[in-house]
Image: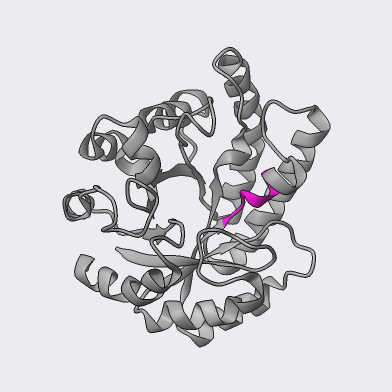
Amino acid sequence: MKFSAAVTLQYPYPFTPYGPEAWKEGLDWIAASGLDGAEVCICDYHGVDVPAFKEELDKRSLGCSTISTGQARAREGLSFSGVPADVIARTQERYRQHVDAAAILHSKVTLGLICGVGSPESREADLATLRESLLPLADYAEKKGVMLILEPLNRYETSILNATEAAADFIRNRLGNPPSVGVLYDLFHSNIEDATFDGAIDRLGSLLQHVHIADSNRQFPGYGHTDFDAIFRKLKAVGFSEYASFEHFNLPSRETVLQETGRWVASMR
């Protein structure tokens, strides 16, 4: 199993202790903390030099776990469902750019809130639109050798895909289980939506491609009630060898995150 933490290249991002102006310092901290890679937040590609970012990773012997893509939802209203067709087309074009960047970085690409917000009443229509929006991107990603990772989110953020089983069912039965689409399993969201962590992990099987780490209150691990020892033993038992990436707020403090990340990762290893 590998571990990563976030950096952001353009805009402030709540899941990293470093702002966009200090992303190189963030990479230094990730490397010094003994992690294996970075999860990079990219909203758009204006002024983003992907090969140069790859060089900075290489200098520090770091990989890139994922491209985090959700900022475009809030900043530009991009979405794969619940929006006019021209917005979906712009979202698809952005994701082709993400896939192209991921091919350079040897990373995966997240599909989170960009899938849409929806409502219980519109869920079936939204899922149908989401399917049609993602099918051509799954084909494009497969040709580029890139994995798209679909993240089920809790009911307070979206009405489309909440439980882990719902995301797995969508991929297997609606998308046709394409080899380029897996699941990003987020422990914070799973704590809200799934009956047990073990059951959720078992239901994913080979779809499990990435893990997001946060405690039950979305603070740094150890400051809520999530049993990380049990979860990581389970991940080891099922043979999970991909990245687990921190996605928690800078709580209880930024200093806690900076000081405790390396020690916590060492304990999990």
Quarter of the image for the C terminus: give it: bottom left
Q: Is residue 40 above or below residue 139?
A: below
Residue 102 placement (x, y as % from top left): 59, 61
Residue 5 placement (x, y as % from top left): 45, 66
Q: How is the image coloured?
A: one colour
- The answer to which of 226 and 202 lies nearer the viewer is 226
Q: Looking at the image, which residue is at 62% across and 32% down?
A: 116
Furthest residue to the right? 86
- Left or right? Give the position of 243 relative to 125: left
Give residue 199's quadrant in the image. top left
Residue 221 placement (x, y as % from top left): 30, 58
In reply to whether residue 227 is colored magenta, the answer given is no
* Image: magenta residue range: 68-73
Q: Looking at the image, which residue is at 54% across and 49% down?
A: 110
Residue 255 placement (x, y as % from top left): 41, 74
In reply to whether residue 69 is colored magenta, the answer given is yes
Q: Is residue 61 above or below residue 76?
A: below
- Left or right? Give the position of 189 relative to 83: left
Q: Is residue 149 above or below residue 263?
A: above
Q: Looking at the image, which residue is at 25% across and 39% down?
A: 197
Q: Looking at the image, which residue is at 62% across and 22% down?
A: 126
- Left or right? Give the position of 162 relative to 195: right
Quarter of the image for the N terminus: give it: bottom left
- The answer to which of 202 and 5 lies nearer the viewer is 5
The image shows a total of numbered marks equal to 0
